[in-house]
Amino acid sequence: MPRPCPPGRTRPKRWSAATASPPLADSRLMRDDVLAVLNEAYRAVVEGLGSLADWGAQGSRPDQFACDIVADEAAFKVLDAAGVGVVSEERNAQGLERDIVVVVDPVDGTSNAIRGIPYYAISLCAVDRQGMQSSLVVNLATGTRFEAVRGQGALCDGRSIVASDCSTMEAAWVAVCGHPRQEHPWRHMRAFGATALELCDVARGLLDAYVNTDVDAIAPWDYLGALLVCHEAGAVSTDGLQRPLVTTDPAARRAPVVAATPSLLAEAVGYAWPGQAREIADR
Amino acid sequence: MPRPCPPGRTRPKRWSAATASPPLADSRLMRDDVLAVLNEAYRAVVEGLGSLADWGAQGSRPDQFACDIVADEAAFKVLDAAGVGVVSEERNAQGLERDIVVVVDPVDGTSNAIRGIPYYAISLCAVDRQGMQSSLVVNLATGTRFEAVRGQGALCDGRSIVASDCSTMEAAWVAVCGHPRQEHPWRHMRAFGATALELCDVARGLLDAYVNTDVDAIAPWDYLGALLVCHEAGAVSTDGLQRPLVTTDPAARRAPVVAATPSLLAEAVGYAWPGQAREIADR
């Protein structure tokens, strides 16, 4: 039975080299090497999960499951062998003093994975002394893959992506994590249940913004991989309480707000964090 | 690149012949014939959409798009030729006096379809003098197919499905349509943006409940096909204002609340419609 083609996702390209971060002094080869390591870690996770009969068996923490542990072990083995530091949701940080630290969530959206909702991902972000250097986020149920390299734009399944040009909450599709406040200024609310993928969906214009209304709910491994994808696709971001979003501190917790445009970001921050300044945009 | 298998969705089978509606006096052959017509209408819609270059071109109403119109024409042609009445979101009702009336939403979740979010569906429900007789809901992006026949259970991609055994809002995954109220008693909120599929996801245990907090937002074509799937999978339902949900009145608007179990339904109605009785369950 043939199925209809998915609707076209092509949209006017707003991103340009001028709006992306400037290229670094480090060689292209080196960045490619790091991206290759992220891809190798992803492949190891897929292999590890493929051999797992019961994804939902309990781990050592209440919110930890067999799939988290298996995926973490597979990713860590690759990353450690590559000589990078590792900050993972599932283990103590290691090698934070190294030139490159990879912040990894082996399975973001574990709850969706256990339930069978096809919206959960691996998220990997390589951070160097200048900040986010390269990242890889892959939907583990569908294989949809997001990649970004600082200064070189963002890709979805190999094609260049850009955020939408939505500039007002009234017209915006907004993914909400945490409890929506009483006021609801958006055109459509969505709650898909996996931060990394919701941010990537902002990057490719399926959504216009993401707000998190909990102060300390989100750790760097939840958002960092997708945040570089967002920035390289032209989206802007801030923390609701004006803390730096780019960090390898495993104890850090943040309230990211991400939007397709600066004016939408200002409105989104005003909605989610009414006491905070509306102008901040840390990209 | 191999992808991990989706997690298992097998769960203890709670549904049994005893909990489903009793079989009707009409012949099995007749019901199969109706289901065949629904499938033929679905195939015609897929074919029609497959030839459509731009799904998002505007229709005659602000919320109507080219894909709605093309899908409606394809479905109507099949249904009318089969001699059934038709109630569709996209045209005036026809043949309401006939023995069987098919209530159809050619594309439920049009907004998702236009944006490229793979969560939109065709929904068809055949209603006879006794109520909902058979239905078909298919996710048009993924091909995932839900079928139900009164008294014969519900299927997803040919396999029997049952709702979860979740009995409290505290443990429940709840899909919300409309604006969430300030109180938020669930374990997880989701908002996927297509009623028909959210209800079917309750039927197969990916979600535990669906609440709609708007009084008159939802028409029979939005929910009727999936409602039979829910009932045949053991879920229960009510309208927030105690109006009958099963109707072929094209002017009817409802506020359906659907839950995996009667006790969860009582809590869900209590949340969404605090002034209303909590015991109602019209299946």
Image: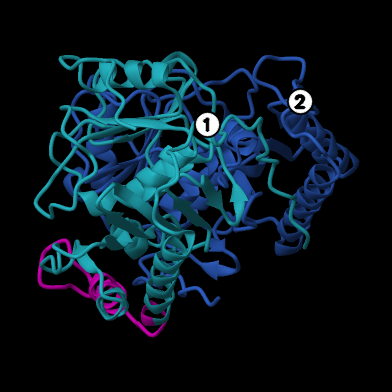
Chain colours: A blue, B cyan
Q: Residue shown at 21%/63% (left/top)?
A: B88
- Which span of residues is magenta-colored? B48-74
Give the camera-side residue of A146 and B51. Answer: B51
Figure label count: 2
- Label 1: how many Cα within 10 Å (few below 14, some 14–19, many 20+): few
In the rendered image, residue B59, in percent from the top left (x then y), is placed at 16, 73
Taking the magenta stretch, the answer to whether it contains residue B121 is no
Q: Circle 1 — which element?
A: loop
In the rendered image, residue B30, in percent from the top left (x then y), is placed at 42, 64
Numbered mark located on residue B275 in the image: none
Can residue A167 be seen by looking at this rendering? no
Q: Quadrant of the C terminus of chain A?
A: top left
In the rendered image, residue B86, in percent from the top left (x then y), is placed at 21, 66
Q: Residue shown at 43%/69% (left/top)?
A: B33
In the rendered image, residue A64, in percent from the top left (x then y), is placed at 70, 22
Can residue B282 be seen by looking at this rendering? yes
- Label 2: how many Cα within 10 Å (few below 14, some 14–19, many 20+): few
Q: Circle 2 — which element?
A: loop
Up/down of A117 relative to B108, above or below: above
Kindly give the residue lying farthest to the front in the view shown: B25
On the rendered structure, is B225 left or right of A58? left
Q: Amino acid at mark 2?
A: Ala
Q: Disc 2 to disc 1, how far (Cα)?
A: 32 Å
The residue labelled by disc 2 is A57
User: Do dots 2 and 1 share one subunit?
Assistant: no
The residue labelled by disc 1 is B18
Which quadrant of the figure has residue B48?
bottom left
On the rendered structure, is B49 left or right of B245? right
Taking the magenta stretch, the answer to whether it contains residue B61 is yes
Give the camera-side residue of B30 and A8. Answer: B30
